[in-house]
Image: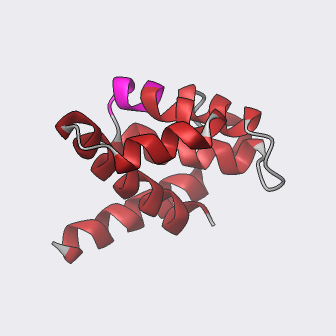
Amino acid sequence: MKQPLVALGLGFALLASSIPADAMARGTIERACLRADRPAANRVLCGCIQTVADATLSSSDQRRGAKLFADPEESQAVKMSDRRSDEVFWDKWERFADGAVKYCQ
């Protein structure tokens, strides 16, 4: 299982390093990241996070996840939910977040 993740990580690293900052993906997650008013948020970082989202999340998961940037309480509610759909989403969201941390720092 680790080998595919390593290969995916190298792919993200190569992709991110070969794309000019102004050509990075623009999408739902990038916009939510920029609007979140966090000190480290900038177009390059948020564009990288969007690139990871495009590789790991469906469009509907990205739309749902974008809401979590703006509402931390919703994030906690989803994380603590007993609903199967919330559990499935949260697992995907954590994998996405782990990937974004690894490849966008």
Spot occupied by residue 11 in the image (x, y as percentages of width and height): 39, 60
Q: Left or right of 17: which side holds 51?
A: left
Q: Is residue 23 left or right of residue 38?
A: left
The residue under the point 21% across, 75% down is: 3
How many discs mark residues in the rendered view? 0
**Quarter the N terminus occupies:** bottom left
Name the spot of residue 84 as percent of width and height, x first.
18, 39
Considering the whole magenta stretch, tell me its main secondary structure: helix
Specify the quadrant of the image occupied by residue 32.
top right
In-front residue for pair 76/32: 76
Q: Is residue 5 left or right of residue 75?
A: left
Q: In this rendering, is residue 94 above or below 56?
A: below
Whether 79 is among the magenta residues is no
Q: Nearer the viewer, residue 56 or 4?
A: 56
Q: Quadrant of residue 36?
A: top right
Is 63 located above or below residue 12 in the figure?
above
**Residue drawn where x is 72% and y is 47% of the image:** 44
* Outermost residue to the bottom: 2
Q: Position of residue 50 (x, y in %)?
A: 54, 40
> How has the structure been colored for display?
secondary structure
Furthest toward the right, the residue is: 39
Residue located 50% across and 43% down the image: 75
Question: Which quadrant is home to the C terminus?
Answer: bottom right
Q: Position of residue 37 (x, y in %)?
A: 80, 41
Q: Which residues are magenta?
A: 58-63
